[in-house]
Amino acid sequence: MLGRPNPLLVLDNLEQVVEAAPDIAALLAACPSLKVLATSRVRLRLAAEYLFPVGPLQLPETAAGSSPDKLARTEAVAFFLDRTRSADPEFTLTESNSDAVAMLVGHLDGLPLAIELAAARIWILPPEVLLARMEQRLPLLTGGPRDAPARQRTMRDAIAWSYDLLTPEEQTLFRWLAVFIGGFRLEAAEAVAAEGDSKIPVIELLGMLVDHSLLRSVTDTPDARRFRYLESLREYGLERLVARGEEQSARDAHAAYFVRAVTSLQERVNDAEPAKRDARLITLLDHLETERDNLRAVLAWLTQQERLEAAMVLAVAIWPFRTNQTHGIEARATLESLLAHACASACSVTRAHALHSLCHLARRQGDTYQAAEAGEEALANFREVDDLVNAGRVLLSLGWALMDRGQTDEALEHHQEGLRLAETVGDQKGMASAHDLLGRVYLVRNQHEASAAHLQEALRLSRTTGDRPCLANVLAHLGVLARREDDTVSASRYLRESIAIAREVGDRHLLPSALAVFGEVLRREGDLAASETCLQESLEICRQTSYEHGEAGALLGLGCLALERGQLGQALGLLRESIVAFQRVGLLSEMQYGATLCLDAFACLSLEVGELVQSARFLGMADTLLDRNGVPRPKGKPLYLDERRLETIRQGLGECELAAAWREGHSLSEEAMVDEVLAFDLPASVSPKQREKAPSGVESRLSPRELEVLRLLAHGSSDREIAETLFVSRRTVTTHVSNLFAKLGVTNRVQATTVAIRDSLL
């Protein structure tokens, strides 16, 4: 038969008899026209071999938000639907279950056997319930066809089949590497494996695990590769690790490697020459982002083992570089838990650093009271051990928290004392930060000359030390000062450099703020298209990172831009979203210049449509926020409310009526202010063209299902009633309600109903 022209020999499951590979090579040599098509979980390692890897099924690009029709066209979902209908012919993909199905096939890594076994459970467990049980998937993925081979009836048996084909050394490495989450590099594998058996040839064995399709090798950087398990395989590896009594040793080695790696990278950044600091900082940021799941696992393990000193060292090493608000919330909760633990109550330098970190994180999230409490304890601890460098830096952090509470006099005292300590010990980085913060205090106090002097000194010092993150902040503050003084040329120069550095070092907290200020400068210069580009990028970054204060500022800038273009309907929608976002942060939780400027913009908008009394009320609201926060109205050219517009309001109302309307607005509570702002609408006299909404308004951000939920919610239905009406679970309704609250920029049902009625969404 093999002597016929162009014969094809098909061999299946060759991993069972991989030792026969030389016989296949001999057969090919004897029959030159022969072609062999072989399937195997293991490479044959023959010279004539060409590999065609069969990867998992294609997964949806996003786990949520896609339409059922679009999801059904992806390989993994299509296969899931096909196998599900064999168990439950009435099952259909709908708006209510499509997100759960997409996430389910993603959790199963697109593996056909895993998907088939999960689909067999649908007649008992709906997708949402099945997804909730995926934390331990192997016990669920059973019940394959009785006419299938034994190894294909459960996911555990399928993996065990491959595991049993490994040598003892390969099995050991397979087990120990299962402690990694999200993958690992070669050096990490070598460090962990060395704790188990220093004689294991890790490079060679990693190659064998890849050959056996138990590990995947992917490009991490141009000069490095990363290895990762599919989650079902990792779960099996952990089961074997626990069964062999090796979990403690493997997790200890995993933790030791990451504590050592992160602290080493941090020291390299801190000790680097100015010219090399940027590159090393970017390396550290990339490492933290890539290893975020491993770092979470290490922190959890160290805490569980009550090794709190090591856990705090790692947490403190990580936190300064996490500019994502969600990560910041997680970091703050971790530090609070560690510091509250009884074993961590004693004074120590490590505890002091953890308290200082908590001070920063709490302040950034608007909790200035916790920031002050943590900072005071950190300061006492550093003073107790005579650590003047860190005592000075804590004073600066405390001053910043006081500044955000509007206590500018107290903030000034802390910054001045921090500067004195930094000068005493020769801490140039501390001196640069102190001058930057002093410049910011004087800017708030409208003392522009003193502000400029401190900021210019901070600029000199940060350039000298090569502290790029500090330099980016200083440049941004100089840009704000120049904008206040209507020097748009200098403002543009400072802000362009600040934005470039923020991009380089990955500071996604400063970047959107600097972009928003630059967008305002460009608007003043008349470049409205470039202004919109900056503000839209700022808004996008803020939403990606859950930076609500920045989001409010970007929406304000876009609202003012729409007002400038005469797009009154668009301006109204954007400014409403902005004030609600400021309210979520807390109108009195920080120095709310932004909320004040937003109310100024509402005064301008109401002036544009002839509502002069309402304009005066909005001005009263803006001034009361400044008064309650204890800060003066910014000196210099305003964001949008200029003297010409103020004079128009004065002449239109007269002094008595203006004063009466101003007092009414000034007397309102924060909640009443927001309610009045949301109730304000354009009068009927406004032209249809001016009323046009932005194409990217609230309605376009809601899915059809979310609009259904909103309509029911607005009519007073509870979550349970909505679930019954739409034939979905209460958990699904809760998720939809949470999502639409975020998209509408509200925090409760009353506000959601108000916005929905206002924007004609019902």
Image: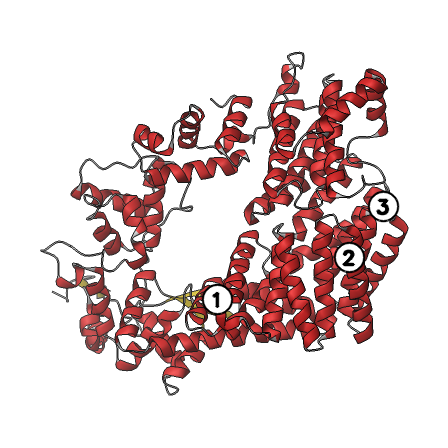
Most distant residue in the bottom direction: 199
Query: In the picture shown, does residue 194 fall above or below 183?
Result: below
The numbered disc on residue 295 is 1
- Horizontal placement of 124 versus 319: left or right? left
Asked if disc 2 and disc 3 are in contact, CB closer than 8 Å, the reply is no
Instruction: Work out how far the residue at label 2 is from the one at label 3, CA to CA, in angstroms.
Output: 14 Å
Q: Amino acid at mark 3?
A: Asn
Q: Left or right: 305 with respect to 39?
A: right
Q: Nearer the viewer, residue 317 or 514?
A: 317
Secondary element at image label 1: helix
Of labels 2 and 1, the one closer to you: 2
For image coordinates 56% across by 56% down, the residue present is 328
Q: Amino acid at mark 1?
A: Leu
User: Element type at marker 3?
Assistant: loop
Q: Residues within 10 Å of mark 2 (few under 14, many from 20)?
A: many
- Up the image or down, 380 lies above or below 552; here it is below
Query: Residue 175, percent across and down?
Result: 32, 74
The secondary structure type at the circle numbered 2 is helix
Name the residue type under label 2.
Leu
**Distance between mark 1 and mark 3 Cα atoms:** 44 Å
Density class for disc 3 (Cα within 10 Å; few <14, some 14-19, many ≥20) is some
Residue drawn at 49 percent across, 67 percent down: 341
Q: Is residue 111 above or below residue 633?
A: below
- Left or right of residue 29: residue 276: right
Quickly name the residue at label 2. 437
Q: Quadrant of residue 524?
A: top right
Q: Quick check: can you spot residue 694?
A: yes
